[in-house]
Amino acid sequence: MNRFGCRLWVGLAALLCAPFTMAAVTIHINHGYGQRFPIAIVPFKGEKAWPLDLRPSTIVSQDLTGSGWFDCLPSKDYLAKPHHAAQVQFNDWQLLKATALLIGHMQSLSDGRVNVAFRLYDVNKGVQIQGFQYTVAPNQLRLLGHKIADVVYQALTGVRGVFNTRIAFVTMHPRGAPGHFLYRLEVADAEGHNVRVILRSREPIMSPRWSPHGGRLTYVSFETTWPAIYVQNVATGQRSQVAAFHGLNGAPSFSPDGTHLALCLSKTGYPEVYVLNLTTGRLRQLTFGPDINTEPSWSPGGGHIVFTSDRSGGPQIYEMTARGGDKHRLTFDGRYNADASFSPNGKWLTLVSRRQGQYHAAVFELADSTLEVLTATSLDESPTFAPNGQEILYSTVVRGHRVLASVSRNGQGHRILGLRGGDISDPAWSPFRHP
Amino acid sequence: MKINKRMLVIVGFAALAGCAGNKAVKPGASATASRSTNVQASGAGNTQATGTQNVSLDSFSHLVHFRFDSSAISASNAKIVKENASYLEAHPDVRVRLEGNTDERGTAQYNMALGQRRADAVKHMLEVLGVSGKQLATISFGKSRPLALGHNRAAWAQNRRTFFNYKYFASK
């Protein structure tokens, strides 16, 4: 009871201070990842002159720890704090059982820019794996920190890191009478820091999706008191209303080339999947019939669209060509499968699957039509692949609050993104900014 | 006709007055059963007491509930729809927005479609009962506007609903 009251108070304080303290505190609860890479990250020379959230070693540590694949060894145990190649004694780090070592230094230049250099070592082999030097403006330091984390992640796991990508999500806070809320569409770094509010409304906001390179968001907003679909430039805030038909206007999703939206409209009286040409405004209806057809999502190549339909009695995932041909059912396992979207390599779908009344994030493998439930939580929704395909972010309920959580694609690693304030839903993970 | 219009004006005024404390609240946004303002308004407006016209908005429920994953209207809920139908037939100038909602289980956009079905089911029954389609608009909020905030069966039962929002058009 006490804890709950305390949480409520913290939440309220967060709301009152919202415009001034937009940086979110992220708490990670990691378990189940099994073996992690023990890595030593030495505070960079010269970084003490900068605030904590701009220091490379801090950003890299947070990113790598948050990914669930790394153990960042505490710096108080370090026998030495090298900053340059000549100072590195591999014995020191082998004793600590570190498999990798990251060192570096930063220096302000006379033109105001900052020079940052780092080296990554394989401690056991005693060799340098990576080393780069960058010169950036001070406002680029956070991005640079994420970039170094990406380099380390890729060098040690063989997979491209996602620390420079972003997530979009919707928060809702009760306001006034029951059934009334303040809704916010927000964007944060992939690890939950650096939160920015994209849209605020007293009417519902839902289902954000990113454009191919992450420059735009499409979403549903009820701000006119009726549902409509918008496309908004994330950097400039410039936006346009692209669909406001009679009935449902929902489930927008960008085509992989960014020129079209797949969406759900019910202007004929029934929810149907359409494709909207964003340049000409032309609509093409892809599904027909009195059933529910919604939640379209494009294959990475753009040739196919998966969608949810209850034509068989309950919601199941179907696939068709992007022109509406060759409709066939994909999921047969379980009586509720919905909201599917493709993995970046097109081999898997992530979706919500109901088992014994519990709603779980799941992965469907297209090659052999197998469906695997990934979570033990019961009210999962909106699963979305990380752009490297390694992780799935979703919304679920933990201890009475709707939060964002993620699970590794094999279901082994789980973590919770402790973004503060309200109930958090509808996550969407951005693609890589540059392919 | 005159009386109805006057009544509407008063209903609208009362609805606005109810929101006066918080200007950020859009009058049409109500998904709650805050009927007290309408009560006085319709009572006061009805100077010509004739049969069903004298029925005030607060004398019957504005909420119809549904079973899980269903848009079927049960017998007890059909009674509520009929009471609303009688009122709407007696007040042909009154428009109502039928707001379909779901509980939080399942996916956001599939629930939007389910919420629309719940609004459409009530609209269909009202039309069968003789209410003009011109008096009726439908919208789905899916799971986005829960009345009860819990993550349990009791909350879910409350949230699976179609709300007769009389304030929406009255305040426009």
Image (cartoon, rainbow, N blue to C red):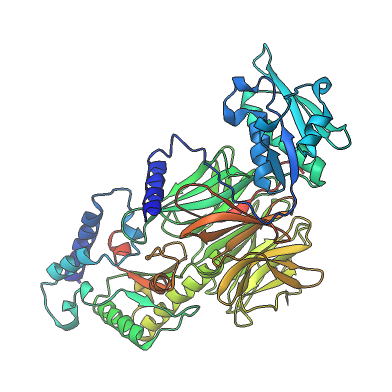
Q: Where, by quadrant of the figure, is residue B15 drawn? A: bottom left
The quadrant of the rendering that contains the N terminus of chain B is bottom left
Task: Name above or below for residue A335 compared with residue A319.
Answer: below
Tell me what residue is drawn at x 54 percent, y 66 percent.
Answer: A379
- x then y, percent, for residue A164: 68, 40
Tell me what residue is drawn at x 36 percent, y 88 percent.
Answer: B75
Residue A70 or residue A401, whichever sits in front: A70
Report whether residue A115 is seen: no
In the rendered view, does B59 fall on the left or right side of A383?
left
Tell me what residue is drawn at x 41 percent, y 58 percent.
Answer: A225
Q: Residue furthest bottom?
A: B75
- x then y, percent, for residue B51: 16, 83
- x then y, percent, for residue B67: 44, 80
- x then y, percent, for residue A305: 71, 65
Q: Residue furthest top?
A: A110
Residue A153 or residue A227, whichever sits in front: A153
Question: How many numbered circles are shown?
Answer: 0
The quadrant of the rendering that contains the C terminus of chain B is bottom left
Report whether residue A106 is seen: yes
Task: Name above or below for residue A50 compared with residue B88.
Answer: above
